[in-house]
Image (cartoon, rainbow, N blue to C red):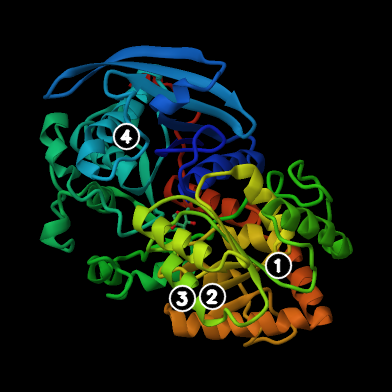
Amino acid sequence: MRVLFLAAEAAPLIKVGGLGDVAGSLPKALRELDPQLELRLVIPFHGVLREQELQLEKVSLFRLNTPGKTFNVEIYMTQTSLGEIYLVGGDGIDITAPVYQSDPALDAEKYCYFSLASLEFCVQEQWPPDIVHANDWHTAFALKALRDRFPEHIQFECTKGVLTIHNLPYQGQGAQGVLPQFGLSAAEDSRLPEWSRGFPLSLGLECADRITTVSPHYAEEIQSPEFGAGLDGYFRGLRPAVKGVLNGIDHDEWNPALDKEVKQPFSSRNIGQRAENKRELQNELGFAANNAIPLIAMVGRVDVQKGVDIAVAALERSVHLPWRAVILGTGDPELEELLSAFAARHAQQVRCILSYDRSLAHRIYAGADMILIPSRYEPCGLTQLIGMRYGCIPVATAVGGLVDTITDERVYPGRGTGFLADHQNAEGFSRVLHHALGAFGERGTWRKIQARAMRRDNSWSRSAKEYLELYTSLQPQTNAGKTGEEKN
Ligand code: NHF
């Protein structure tokens, strides 16, 4: 079976958000699961990638004709630790632009070009894919193009489309202006609200043979007005329903027993050794070492979605208790400001590092006691998976994939792997934080929570199997082995 896997970013080359982790590690897991699978992972040749010293192989050079203009497309391939990645360069990629701009209208041409050029690459290579797997709005154009631009194209005769939604509110609002110049039309499906029909995500929703999202709970939630971003009615009526396939993490990359960033390797069998990492981390952060004071972490995008303000408010309410906190991440300038002010108010207790620091993130997971994830919504979430793997216990809101992956010790005493707050507000979150801080004081209980969390299997193995089954169910007859010519 041949799978064309399209994404805006993919680790280890480029990682802005969780999509990058998934697009890097899921293809690797799929290839490991089925060595016969021919999977091509394709991402844009973003300007920032040109600053890296990549070993590039130029694999194709061709023209992409669109009603608006003719583009010269260049395709490169590079080997990475997670497998090969194809890069789409050429006229349609503005190398001065970042991976994402604040307004999708500014990114529209790049991603539409990228989606179409990726399909044209298959034509040029006579490599007819059985599945085109698009991720989020940036690559959803490809599923529409299979219908609008290539309907008669014999190479795509059997091709099926899968669309994975990683973050529903991001639908490419404003990117619709680009459609005519690429020969694409807005969605016509009357079940989609009219206002959404030009948005790239809707093009993908209309044309995908199967729609998935990144956790079963989020697949349910998006059918409600609270989480549906205006499309809840559409999802409620959808048959087959949106399928939730839980994200995993790469257990090779995230392995506390082998992690090179971590001073003292450890596993669930010798959690005691973890204390050395906490000591190191405290030193690094300028805290006097004290194992009895809980060290609370928050790592990731500084964003309203992630509930950064909820965390600050909840910590403020608990400021009389002994704890220390370290916050690592970048994002929304206003929230960054809030964090800096919070750290300045509580200089004895709080450290705030407003940057992207992969290596420090590893040390935090390996040394902090708990990780706060007060998300307002969370399609899957990766920090809780990494946290659990490193015995850094998640204290999270009960939304999306957090519900699917964390067993709440309050509800299931003796079986928990973390703590879940029912409400996405400071009050609810501070209640659960108090509970977690209390549990931390009971050393034996805490150790057991850590051991259970560390033993939980959050690898890709089960989910990769689900994706493979989904691909197979869509495509009983595969294109593999046939070239475009043979099919002609
Ligand atoms: O895990 C990758 C990630 C999710 O919850 C996360 C999110 C963005 O918000 O699927 O995408």
Q: Are marks 2 and 1 in contact (CB under 8 Å)?
A: no
Residue type indicated by callout 1: Asp
Query: What is the distance, in whole Å, between disc 3 and disc 4 at their CAs?
Result: 55 Å
Q: Which residue is mark 1?
A: 369
Measure how far apart labels 1 and 4 are at the Cα level: 53 Å
Q: CA distance from mark 4 to mark 2?
A: 57 Å
- Foreground disc of the pair 3, 1: 3
The label shown at residue 18 is: none
**Residue underneath mark 4:** 157
As rendered, which of 420 and 440 lies closer to the eye? 440
Label located before the other in sequence (3 or 1): 3
- How far across and how far down the image is residue 272, in percent? 87, 65
Q: What residue is disc 3 on?
A: 313
Q: Quadrant of residue 225?
A: bottom left
N-terminal-most mark, 2 or 1: 2
Q: Amino acid at mark 4?
A: Glu
The mark total stands at 4
Please say if 24 is above or below 119: below
> In the image, residue 439 lies at what x, y percent?
72, 83
Query: Is 87 rendered above or below residue 334?
Result: above
The secondary structure type at the circle numbered 1 is loop
Task: Residue at 15% x, 53% y: name it.
Answer: 197
Q: Which residue is mark 2?
A: 315
Q: Position of residue 131 (x, y in %)?
A: 42, 40
Residue 94 position in % (x across, y down): 29, 24
What is the crowding at mark 2: few (fewer than 14 residues within 10 Å), some, or many (at least 20)? many
Residue 180 appears in which quarter of the rendering? top left
Q: Is disc 3 placed on a helix, strand or loop?
A: helix
